[in-house]
Image (tube, rainbow, N blue to C red):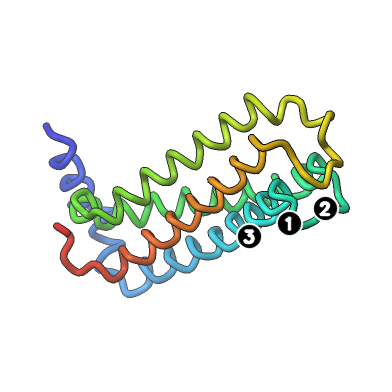
Amino acid sequence: MSLFEVAKAVEASPIATAMRVSNYWFPLLNLIHLSGLVVAAGTVVYWDLRLLGRGLSSASVSQVGKSLLPWTWGGFGVMFVSGSLLVVIEAGRLYTNVFFRIKVAALLLAGLNVLIFHLTVYRTVEAWDRAPITPLQARVAGALSLALWFCIMAAGRALGYSLDYNT
């Protein structure tokens, strides 16, 4: 069974069908997904701006991280659960959608960016924690994060306007 056939089967499942034909599930899940996005992306922007030396410069990098990280993970968790349910509703149609593929690729790259950042430059944060200008690698990670989150949001919005799911 191909991945596309799996996606079509998921879309045809009783739970996906029930949510799709309901007048309430899709808009409710969308609202929850966007609420999670506001929290996660908002905290990511503050973090990235601190890494770029453009915001919250009076606070240490580690303190900004400690303050924002629980909110970031909470927002991301809400987005992950609600987004997964939104995908279930139309998995077969999303499978071939170029904007969905861009969004998933950008999400994976954003996760990889965070992983690489924390495994490399962030390990020496005590050396540059209060510096108004962070190391180049931290600034690159922050800029890349901002670009990827913009891409994630733009691709997500484009999904709602891409009537031809084979685009």
Residue 93's disc number: none
Q: Amino acid at mark 2?
A: Ser
- Can residue 6 be seen in the rendering of this structure? yes
Above or below residue 113? Residue 76 is below
Q: Nearer the viewer, mark 2 or mark 3?
A: 2
Q: Considering only vertical position in the picture, is 160 above or below 37?
A: below
Residue bearing mark 3: 42
Q: Is residue 13 visible?
A: no
Residue in the image at 86% along x and 41% along y: 130
Residue 93 drawn above or below residue 117? below
Q: Residues within 10 Å of mark 2 (few under 14, many from 20)?
A: some
Residue 14, given in percent of the width and then of the height, sits at 23, 53
Per the model, the C-alpha gap separating discs 2 and 1 is: 7 Å
Give the residue type that dot 1 points to: Arg
Dot 3: what SS? Answer: helix
Q: Which residue is mark 2?
A: 57
- Which residue is more in the foreground, 133 or 35? 133
Label 1 neighbour load within 10 Å: few <14, some 14-19, many 20+: few
Picture quarter with the C terminus:
bottom left
Q: Residue at x 24, y 67 (%)?
A: 162
Residue 38 falls left or right of residue 104: right
Q: Nearer the viewer, residue 56 or 83?
A: 56
**Mark-to-mark CA distance, 2 and 3:** 17 Å
**Position of residue 58 measured from the top left corner of the image (x, y, whole percent):** 88, 53
At label 3, the amino acid type is Gly
Residue annotated with mark 1: 54
**In which quadrant of the rendered image does the N terminus lie?**
top left
Secondary structure, mark 1, is loop
In this rendering, position of residue 102 left or right of residue 12:
right
Measured as percent of width and height from the top left, residue 125 is found at: 78, 31
